[in-house]
Amino acid sequence: MIWFTVQLDDKPGALARMAAALADKSINITAIVGVAEDTDGALMLTTSDAAGTRKAFEALGLAFEEHDPEAGLSLDDMSRATGLADRRMNVGS
């Protein structure tokens, strides 16, 4: 399972455009967590098709990072990497 971290534009419809790009490729969002504070924010998600997600994000020109928990990166590490922990938000159990 690959987690993707994306930063969306602070514009109405940015999340909808990202979700529609995945839907157009029949890709399901299997998990999602996000935080927004003023105009800064991050979204982390997993999908049913990592390769298709990469292609959809690239077609949108959407910058993203990938995180592979099996490579030793935990959800706690990802929350720190995206600044969620700085906002006192915890990801995981």
Image (cartoon, rainbow, N blue to C red):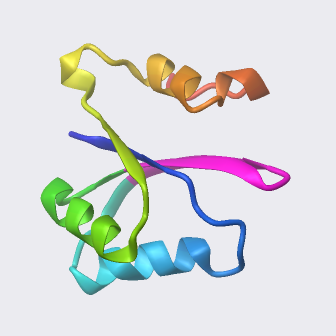
The one nearer the camera, 15 or 61, is: 61
Q: Residue at x 77, y 28 (%)?
A: 87
Q: Residue at x 22, y 79 (%)?
A: 26
Where residue 3 appears, as percent x and y from the top left, is: 33, 41
Number of numbered markers: 0
The one nearer the camera, 8 or 31, is: 8
Does residue 59 lie above or below 53 as drawn?
A: below
Question: Where the N terminus falls, by quadrant?
Answer: top left
The one nearer the camera, 38 or 28, is: 38
Can residue 60 be found in the magenta stretch?
A: no
Q: Quadrant of residue 29?
A: bottom left
Q: Residue at x 67, y 22 (%)?
A: 85
Can residue 43 be found in the magenta stretch?
A: yes
Q: Quadrant of residue 63?
A: bottom left
Q: Residue furthest top?
A: 72
The one nearer the camera, 80 or 64, is: 64
Q: Residue furthest right?
A: 38
Q: Residue furthest bottom?
A: 24
Where residue 49 appears, as percent x and y from the top left, is: 17, 60
Q: Quadrant of residue 24?
A: bottom left
Relative placement, left or right, of 47 versus 37 is left
* Magenta part of the chain: 31-45
Q: Residue at x 32, y 80 (%)?
A: 23
Where residue 60 appears, as percent x and y from the top left, is: 38, 75
